[in-house]
Amino acid sequence: MTDPIANYLNQGGIPVQPSYFLGSKILLGYQFEYDNYKITYRIEQGGLIICDLARLDDETTSPTGLLRLFSLLKKMTLEKGELTEIKGMVIDNVFDDKLHEIRARLIQLLLKKGAEFSTDENGDNWLVFSLNKLRACSKSS
């Protein structure tokens, strides 16, 4: 596997598996489990794209687990200098009020952690962490 993130995770004892679109042969990206979350991602144009983030068990999930997950993502991407950003699409306009509230809280948490909103050429909204900014901040502190 030539994916630097998969190599990093595998070396740290976190197995990474290919993830296929709806059970087809179309490779969506790769997935791993960490701290009761399942993350599907892919590397595209120098960025780590979070394709899916799912809790494995509602009973044992805590906000600190999510913070540990994002700390891991930040640490591994900062160590992989060829990556320039971490991003995930913002989908908060859902009909389920509870899900909408959870996603709104997640967005606020990520904004507090340094993410910024970005809109692409298709009008889709993304939350983006600029790794170049994070690297600059970590070098100055």
Image (cartoon, rainbow, N blue to C red):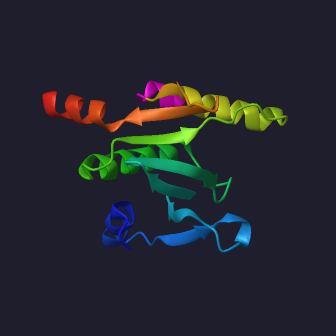
- What is the total number of numbered labels drawn onto the structure image? 0
The main secondary structure of the magenta stretch is: helix
Q: Residue at x 30, y 71 (%)?
A: 11
Outermost residue to the left: 140
Q: In this rendering, would 107 be left or right of 98? A: left
Q: In this rendering, would 136 be left or right of 20? A: left
Horizontal and vertical percent for residue 21? 67, 64
Q: Residue at x 44, y 72 (%)?
A: 15
Q: Residue at x 53, y 64 (%)?
A: 31
Q: In this rendering, would 141 be left or right of 82? A: left
Q: Is residue 109 above or below residue 88?
A: above
Horizontal and vertical percent for residue 102? 68, 35
Q: Quadrant of the C terminus?
A: top left
In which quarter of the view is residue 96 placed?
top right
Horizontal and vertical percent for residue 112? 46, 25
Front one among 107 and 84: 84
In which quarter of the view is residue 101 placed?
top right
Front one among 42 and 65: 42
Kindly tell me whether residue 14 is visible in this rendering: yes
Horizontal and vertical percent for residue 83? 33, 48
What range of the chain is rendered magenta?
A: 109-114
Kindly tell me whether residue 141 is visible in this rendering: no
Q: Quadrant of the N terminus?
A: bottom left
Q: Is residue 43 above or below residue 119?
A: below
Q: Is residue 18 magenta?
A: no
Q: Is residue 51 above or below residue 14?
A: above
Q: In this rendering, would 11 be left or right of 49? A: left
Q: Is residue 113 magenta?
A: yes
Q: Residue at x 24, y 49 (%)?
A: 81
Front one among 42 and 31: 42
Outermost residue to the front: 121
